[in-house]
């Protein structure tokens, strides 16, 4: 950190104030530049804890994918075998041929999982073996357009089962979720915002609620001219009575803001980003009560990408399924950001389809014209299927859908989790982030409070809470008067070649920082904790020097 009279970093106070308007992901690039310069001028290794990309991958379902690919080529050549050329795989008898392939290659990587997955699909999901195996093999070859365009039949059923297990506590819900396979959570966000607007379920200038702190793009999208939403913040600002720390939970009064009928939609990331804490059950129940008794029309969009890192996670999809659009990305849990795998899930009985049926006639006529080339009864087209069409400007609906090899890898990820009855892989990944979280706090020489709702994928540290608890309100006033919140970030980058993100960019506290616990080696996090303490100690030393003798 740097004092107002003698700054220790090259970025001026005025420049830092200008940088406040940037997304934290853009500010990160500036910090990386400084960290790289510092790294070149010293023997330090840059530690970029601003990235959310995990440094682990799920190997077994990938082995299954590539081994299935070898079998798929064999099936292609069985049909038509010329130099460099094969034919389309054939469905009849393909399950038996795969069984023979497995028998003939007992040591080939991934085959044990393939066998277990097919047995699970046969036993638990009652799939026709030839139909399921053919979908996998033809899909992995990628020789045809996706059909159905929203998602392959067996792939959708597998993902439904996976979402029930991981997002809904394995509860048996009445009805089912229809699933749209998309190019990661980012595509899901774009498609949802677009289709809500196109179908007049939201309008430019509407009031919407954001559960903050919040993944920055949700905030930024709302401010785009096309949407220009009026934002109401539902803030996770509760603090523990015992020690004043953030619990990152929503007080009842914040949930109750949603009783306001002018608020059209609620956007939630759960577990939150960057606090990385799941919404507690009492808050979920209160939200459910508000919706059932006062706001049955409230649109809920929940992004649950980090749900697998919380034991027994319970999504809003499970509690208010009829009002909820669920977003799930496979990127973090399976280490597959480059695969671009995500889904949008909407219950078959939902408020969106009902709202479409009662739109003013002028809007119905407009939408019937928009979707009229797809069906003779466009007014009956479900909202999720409109989303599919909207994703390809309607006119290209016949070639819509996530690529088939991507859908196959998604299916294998889900089957891998479903056949893992002891949750061995889940325990491995949760242990990784919890181990790193402990190391971070040990580096700061602080005890880590227990929290069963903590996800641990990120850590958000409010330095002002620490300052007041450790040194009292006088030190807090000194900090506010003499320092900028970004001093911590730039001090870390310039002195230690370490990159963190500003919590304020996520509508979090001004003096908070986000540490990603996913992308660096375990030993890096105790180092980051020590560095944070040392950077803050500069301000402590300056403050003490000004105290009367």
Image: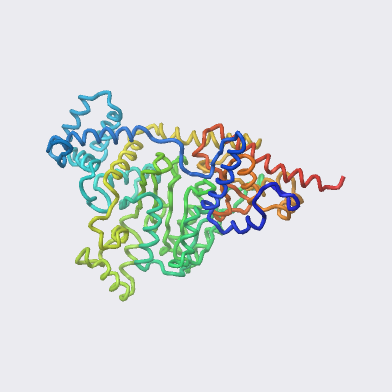
The residue depicted at 28 percent of the width and 42 percent of the height is 408
Q: Nearer the viewer, residue 546 or 7?
A: 7
The residue depicted at 61 percent of the width and 41 percent of the height is 38
Residue 311 point in image, percent of width and height: 46, 39
Looking at the image, residue 201 sits to the left or right of residue 388; the answer is right
Residue 302 point in image, percent of width and height: 43, 53
Looking at the image, residue 128 sits to the left or right of residue 433; the answer is left
| 262 to 95, vertically: above or below | below
Looking at the image, residue 223 sits to the left or right of residue 39; the answer is left
Q: Quadrant of residue 400?
A: bottom left
Q: Nearer the viewer, residue 232 or 205?
A: 205
Q: Nearer the viewer, residue 363 or 65?
A: 65
| 254 to 367, vertically: above or below | above
Q: Quadrant of residue 166?
A: top left
View extreme (right): residue: 549
Report how many numbered discs are placed on residues in the image.
0
View extreme (bottom): residue: 362
| Screen quadrant of the C terminus | top right
| 473 to 387, vertically: above or below | above
Q: By what rule are the colours in the image chosen?
A: rainbow
Residue 226 point in image, percent of width and height: 43, 67
């Amino acid at each position: 950190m740097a004092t107002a009279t003698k700054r220790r970093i090259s970025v001026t106070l005025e420049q830092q104030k200008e940088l406040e308007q940037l997304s934290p992901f853009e500010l990160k690039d500036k910090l990386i530049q400084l960290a790289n310069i510092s790294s070149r001028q010293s023997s330090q290794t840059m530690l970029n804890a601003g990235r959310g990309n995990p440094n682990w991958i799920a190997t077994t379902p990938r082995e299954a994918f590539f081994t299935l690919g070898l079998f798929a080529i064999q099936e292609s050549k069985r049909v038509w075998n010329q130099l460099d050329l094969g034919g389309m795989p054939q469905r009849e008898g393909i399950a038996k041929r795969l069984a023979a392939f497995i028998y003939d290659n007992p040591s080939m990587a991934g085959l044990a999982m393939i066998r277990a997955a097919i047995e699970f699909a046969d036993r638990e999901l009652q799939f026709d073996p030839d139909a399921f195996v053919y979908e996998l093999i033809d899909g992995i070859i990628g020789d045809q357009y996706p059909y159905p365009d929203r998602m392959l039949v067996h792939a959708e059923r597998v993902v439904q089962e996976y979402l029930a297990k991981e997002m809904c506590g394995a509860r048996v819900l009445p009805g089912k979720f229809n699933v749209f396979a998309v190019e990661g959570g980012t595509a899901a966000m774009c498609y949802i915002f677009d289709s809500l607007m196109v179908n007049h379920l939201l309008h430019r200038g509407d009031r919407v609620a954001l559960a903050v702190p919040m993944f920055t793009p949700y905030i930024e999208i709302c401010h785009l001219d096309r949407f220009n939403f009026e934002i109401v913040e539902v803030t996770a600002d509760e603090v523990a009575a015992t020690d004043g720390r953030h619990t990152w939970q929503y007080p009842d009064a914040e949930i109750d803001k949603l009783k306001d009928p002018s608020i059209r939609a609620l956007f939630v990331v759960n577990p939150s980003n960057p606090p990385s804490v799941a919404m507690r059950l009492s808050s979920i129940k209160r939200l459910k009560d508000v919706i059932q008794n006062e706001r049955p029309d409230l649109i809920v969009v929940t992004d649950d990408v980090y749900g697998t890192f919380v034991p027994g996670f319970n999504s809003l999809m499970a509690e208010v399924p009829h009002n909820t659009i669920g977003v799930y990305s496979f990127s973090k849990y399976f280490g597959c950001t480059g695969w671009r795998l995500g889904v949008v899930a909407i219950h078959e009985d939902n408020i969106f389809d009902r709202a479409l049926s009662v739109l003013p006639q002028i809007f119905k006529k407009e939408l019937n014209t928009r979707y009229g080339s797809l069906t003779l009864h466009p007014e009956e087209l479900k909202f999720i299927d409109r989303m599919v069409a909207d994703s390809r400007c309607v006119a290209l609906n016949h070639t819509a859908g996530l690529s088939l090899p991507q859908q196959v890898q998604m299916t294998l990820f889900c089957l891998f989790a479903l056949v893992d009855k002891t949750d061995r892989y889940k325990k491995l990944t949760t242990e990784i982030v919890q181990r790193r979280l402990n190391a971070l706090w040990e580096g700061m020489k602080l005890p880590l409070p227990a929290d069963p709702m903590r996800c641990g994928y990120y850590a958000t540290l409010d330095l002002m809470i620490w300052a007041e608890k450790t040194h009292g309100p006088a030190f807090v006033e000194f900090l506010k008067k003499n320092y900028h919140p970004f001093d911590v970030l730039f001090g870390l980058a310039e002195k230690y070649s370490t990159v963190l993100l500003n919590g304020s960019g996520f509508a979090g506290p001004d003096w908070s920082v986000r540490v990603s616990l996913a992308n660096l080696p375990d030993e890096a996090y105790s180092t980051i904790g020590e560095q944070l303490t040392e950077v803050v100690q500069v301000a402590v030393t300056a403050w003490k020097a000004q105290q009367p003798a």
